[in-house]
Amino acid sequence: METRVVIYARVSTAGQDYERQLSELREYASRMGYEVVKEFSEKISGAKKIAEREALADLLKYVEENKIDKVLIYECSRLSRRAVDFLQVVEYLTEHGISVYIHQNGLETLLPNGGPNPIAQLVLGILAQFNSMERGLIRSRMESGYNHFRRQGGKVGRKVGYRKSADEMKTQYSKEIQLIKKGISLRNIAAICGVSVNTLQKIKKII
């Protein structure tokens, strides 16, 4: 059976062109005898969260609903410059038995037998470590800022009895709402966006 693949390409600004990425990935697919069933491309910063990336969100919904074997990308940063989001997307695809092929590195996340690629795991583990260090530094800085604020007599946190209004929820979780409306399952949205299923259930009730 022919291997069914989708291609994803991204550039950061309107002045850039992703045609070279598409061209090289099409050529690779042709050389390997793959069937390219769909292409996704967009011009948006790789630092944006997954929920803000319309083409990437559409890709994730597409592979969930169709039998796809691989997602072809040019390099890791095309998928996301946010390590945590990159890992979430790879994990999401792995759970669906879909391998990610990274052209620049000649690397695939799954082996031909469908098992995880240990070399890919090593690379992704390094990315995860960088992300963990970054998040740790941010938490440390925030904690230091909070402690300084408290020492100055400030109070941190919500007022007692405070609950977000429906409008506030819609504003804060606008991208999650978009994914819900696209029909992506709550479990998969939770994996993509890092939001709990319980929170998504509350969001679903107000839309």
Image (cartoon, rainbow, N blue to C red):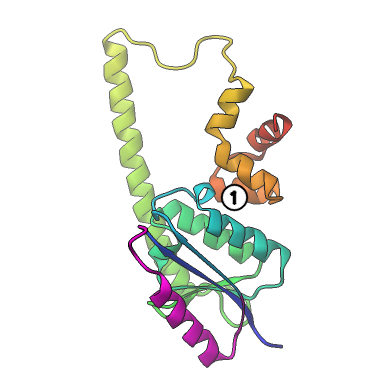
Q: Quadrant of residue 57?
A: bottom right
State the image coordinates of residue 182 (x, y, percent, origin top left). Answer: 68, 50
Looking at the image, is 19 positioned above or below residue 203? below
Q: Residue at x 59, y 83 (%)?
A: 112
- Identify which amino acid the numbered label 1 is placed on: Ala
Q: Which span of residues is magenta-colored?
A: 13-37
State the image coordinates of residue 1 (x, y, percent, origin top left). Answer: 71, 88
The image quadrant where one finds the C terminus is: top right
Q: Nearer the viewer, residue 39 or 162?
A: 39
Q: Residue at x 37, y 58 (%)?
A: 14
Q: Report the number of discs.
A: 1
Q: Is residue 89 left or right of residue 20?
A: right
Q: Residue at x 29, y 16 (%)?
A: 149
Give the residue pinned by disc 1. Answer: 191
Looking at the image, is 78 positioned above or below residue 19? above
> Label 1: few (<14), some or many (≥20) within 10 Å?
some
Looking at the image, is 127 positioned above or below residue 37? above
Q: Quadrant of residue 5?
A: bottom right
Q: Residue at x 62, y 44 (%)?
A: 178
Question: Is 120 included in the stretch rendered in magenta?
Answer: no
Q: Is residue 134 left or right of residue 21?
A: left
State the image coordinates of residue 157 (x, y, percent, origin top left). Answer: 45, 17
Question: Is 31 included in the stretch rendered in magenta?
Answer: yes
Looking at the image, is 5 positioned above or below residue 146? below
Q: Secondary structure at mark 1?
A: helix
State the image coordinates of residue 81 (x, y, percent, origin top left). Answer: 38, 56
